[in-house]
Amino acid sequence: MTADLRLVLIGTGNPTPRAHRAGQSIAVLTDNAGAIFDLGPGSAMNLFASSVDPLAIDQLFFTHHHFDHMADFGHFVMARWDQGAGAGDALTVYGPPPLRRIADLLFGPEGVYGPDLHARTRHPLSQRIHRLRGGPMPRTLPVLDIHELEEGDTVATQSWKVTTGPARHVQPYLTSLSYRLETPSASVVISGDTRPLPALVDFARDADVLVHMAMDLQNEIDRWPEIATSCTGAAGAARIAAQANAKHLVLVHLDTTADHPDRQDAMLAEAHAEFSGNITLGEDFLEIPVTA
């Protein structure tokens, strides 16, 4: 197993559309494997414009099924397959239920992309373009290997181990998961969307990088009980990082308020008051060092 990890922030925003922040999406790569966690709106285009090769992504994980974390599921799968000349046909996808139904409603014969897939595999124009790209014939459909996960499940590959952990966001309406990806010498924890959760402390214990939701200043989050029971601010994320003894905290899922320099400074200040390690306010396309 290789231990060298790349962590690339593909999207760091929230549901509000912004040109400079896609919906949440985080890529983790080694020399021989790649995973992406969530595909919020705009993240597929960011990925294609980034230093990450889409064909290097062979695993896709969803933290939950809010649109700002999965709106680009269809775009990513279709573009990767269409442009990949056969190399982008297969993808393994993980996430909470009802992931299997979502995938079928998108890519099944009667799904949203069913007519497009039928045309692109049958029409002479599409077949010709596929051959010009170096693709084999007959052209095959995307093959999605879907796995629905629950908290405590583990996915092990030759490159890493991924474990699902706790997250509390909008249950019982949607199931939310956090993820911990580990190699023998490095670890990354991705909180997904969650309120400040003590159970995440043990899950993120000694992580090299903790990527945590932080919409705004914590006192702004705490003003609204409906938000405070579902989301985390900068100080709340920093307390989790400090108690977990994480080395580096990366704040993502940023609200529009965090686009203002003064607010960014205030968020970093309140986070630094709780956590003495490295803190990064996320930006799209930013690469985060992962060192044990």
Image (spheres, grey):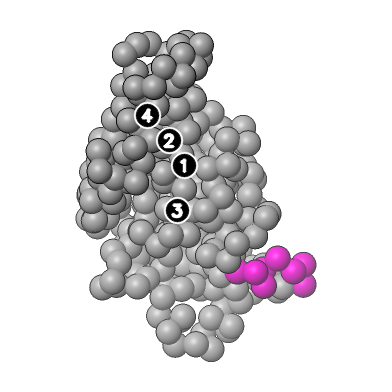
As measured in the structure, the alpha-carbon distance from the residue carrying label 1 to the one carrying label 3 is 8 Å
As measured in the structure, the alpha-carbon distance from the residue carrying label 1 to the one carrying label 4 is 17 Å
- Mark 1 or 4, nearer chain start: 1
- Mark 4 or 2, nearer chain start: 2
**Location of residue 18 in the rendering, given as x and y in whole percent from the top left corner:** 65, 60
In magenta, the rendered stretch is 255-262
Q: On the image, numbered disc 3 is attached to which residue?
A: 71
Establish if 80 lies above or below 64: above
Left or right side of 222 for 281:
right
- List the single residue furthest toward the front: 124
The residue depicted at 77 percent of the width and 72 percent of the height is 262
Q: On the image, numbered disc 2 is attached to which residue?
A: 78
Q: Quadrant of the N terminus?
A: top left
**Location of residue 175 in the rendering, given as x and y in whole percent from the top left corner:** 28, 64
The residue depicted at 50 percent of the width and 49 percent of the height is 25
What number is the disc on residue 75? 1
Looking at numbered disc 1 in the image, what kind of residue is underneath it?
Answer: His
Looking at numbered disc 4 in the image, what kind of residue is underneath it?
Answer: Ala
Kind of element beneath mark 4: helix
